[in-house]
Image (tube, helix red, strand yellow):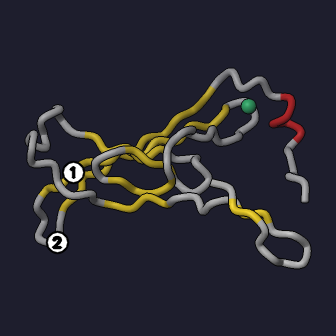
Amino acid sequence: MSAIINPVVEICEHREFDAGVDVNRLTDDVGKLTGFMAHIRVRCRGCGVMMKFLGLPIGCHLDGATVSVGAEELRAAIAPHLDWIAPGKAPEFRGFVARQAPVVDVPVSGEIIKASH
Ligand SMILES: [Zn+2]
């Protein structure tokens, strides 16, 4: 199957952009502040294509950075200052990160012959 590519996107040089940021203040069940997240999206003004954020895992990491499925939204943990989470008291991992399954070569018969790592 080939991807359907919008001809406007294909000829656009992607020179100007619009960006949107949602900043979220996170609280626990009793309303105690637990963190902040910025969700960032960037769209080409010329063709409308959403820019992809590269090199980050899919997920939602409350103490790091991830992307949405499709990588069109950067989800970044933010804080008012670097020691907002006290040194040595970093919380256990909060959130989730999706990992890509290993690529498996499957012959027409459906039998697995080799797994790539
Ligand atoms: Zn463009």
Please report the residue visible at 70 percent of the width from the left and 40 percent of the height from the top. 49
Give SS at disc 1. strand
Q: Where is 93 relative to 9, above or below?
A: below
Q: Is residue 48 left or right of residue 78?
A: right
Cβ of mark 1 under 8 A from ligand 1: no
Query: Which x, y percent locates residue 21?
Result: 43, 41
* Relative vertical location of residue 96 with respect to residue 41 in this rendering, above or below: below
Left or right: residue 91 compared with residue 60: left
Report which residue position mark 1 lands on. 35
Viewer-side residue, 93 vs 11: 93
Measure how far apart labels 2 and 1 are at the Cα level.
Answer: 13 Å
- What residue is rendered at 71% in x and 39% in y? 48
| Left or right placement of residue 45 versus residue 113 in this view | left
Instruction: Identify the amino acid type marked 2.
Output: Asp
User: Residue at (77%, 72%) from the top-left corner?
Assistant: 112
Snapshot quadrant of residue 54: top right
Q: In the rendering, which numbered label is found on residue 12?
A: none
Q: Nearer the viewer, residue 19 or 86?
A: 86
Residue on which the image places disc 2: 29
